[in-house]
Amino acid sequence: MRIAAPTALAAFCLLAVTTGAGACGGSIACSVEGGTYRIELPRSGDATGKSKARGAYVFFHGHRSSAKLQMRHRALVGAAHRHGLAFVAVDGLKGSWSHPNAPGRFRDEAAFIRNVLDDLEKRFGFDRSNTLAGGFSQGASMAWYGLCWSGDRFAGAVTFSGVFWEPIPKPEDCVTDLPPMIHFHGRQDETFPLAGRAVGSRFHQGDTFKSITVAREAARCERDVENIVIADFSCSLVAGCVRGGVTLCLYDGGHQVQPDYLDIGLTRLGF
């Protein structure tokens, strides 16, 4: 992951929220059935310093990472905060995700994601109107499956360098009201190429363009593909969808996620 180096963790150790069972937030992981997540709320910037989060960005980390390590990438957390969003780092098991067709089989990820979303609503008041999905690499794949299963519980998605795995789901396998989505992917990505690649002898990453097509069909988009430029990205947009357009943005580069990409994506989604 190419992203700004971590700084001191003092800012991360703030804003624990107490709800019956105890404190949760900042350096204290939130526990739900099946696993944990970490959350940091943005500061208001005024004299009170209290949080005024307008929503939450739920991020699935890359392979061999963790929620704790993800929170150390302060620039990405800061990008979400600048948009008034809490940064939520969901924790995979054994540094990985058990989405369909993944090498690992450690838990029921669909149930776990529902538990995280339920807890975010109960503890912090974030719901389908202001909760966005995100992820990097295999974590982006996890986000895509989470949207396929529970897209009706998200307001949007900004993902990076990872999509479905083979065999790619059919549009009818996903909920019919997917939220607006923006996916960023490097043309020279060799870790998760645009066309996907074999992982061992039994598993295969999916094709980015085929995955985008599935998302657009599931979202019931009715317009043709429109080629547009967003910032310096060459993007293809299909609008006329039930809840918002599905956009693929390509760049000259490899396997990475950058804070300014997130900023561009969130701005495009209106957050």
Image: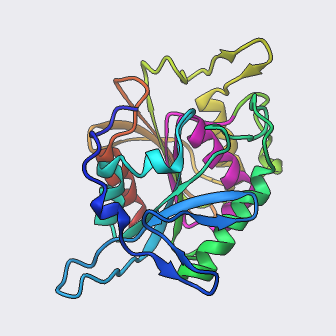
Give coordinates of residue 53: x percent, y percent.
Answer: 39, 77
Q: Nearer the viewer, residue 107 or 151?
A: 107
201 lies left or right of 23: right
Residue sitting farthest toward the left: 47
Give coordinates of residue 118: x percent, y percent.
Answer: 68, 73
Residue 69 colored magenta?
no
* Magenta-drawn segment: 135-164
Q: Quadrant of the N terminus?
A: top left
107 lies left or right of 51: right
Q: Quadrant of the C terminus?
A: bottom left
Give coordinates of residue 225: x percent, y percent.
Answer: 53, 41
Q: Is residue 215 above or below residue 220?
A: above
Residue 153 colored magenta?
yes
Asked where in the image residue 9 lies, by quadrant, the reply is bottom left
Residue at screen point 75% across, 28% down: 103
Colour style of the rendered protein structure: rainbow
Q: Is residue 1 above or below residue 72?
A: above
Q: Is residue 73 above or below residue 193?
A: below
**Is residue 175 visible to us here?**
no
Residue at screen point 31% across, 47% down: 259
Asked where in the image residue 214 lies, by quadrant, the reply is top right
Residue sitting farthest toward the top: 201
Q: How many marks?
A: 0
Residue at screen point 27% across, 40% down: 4
118 lies left or right of 192: right
Q: Is residue 117 above or below residue 205?
A: below
Residue at screen point 46% across, 21% down: 189
46 lies left or right of 234: left
**Is residue 183 visible to us here?**
yes
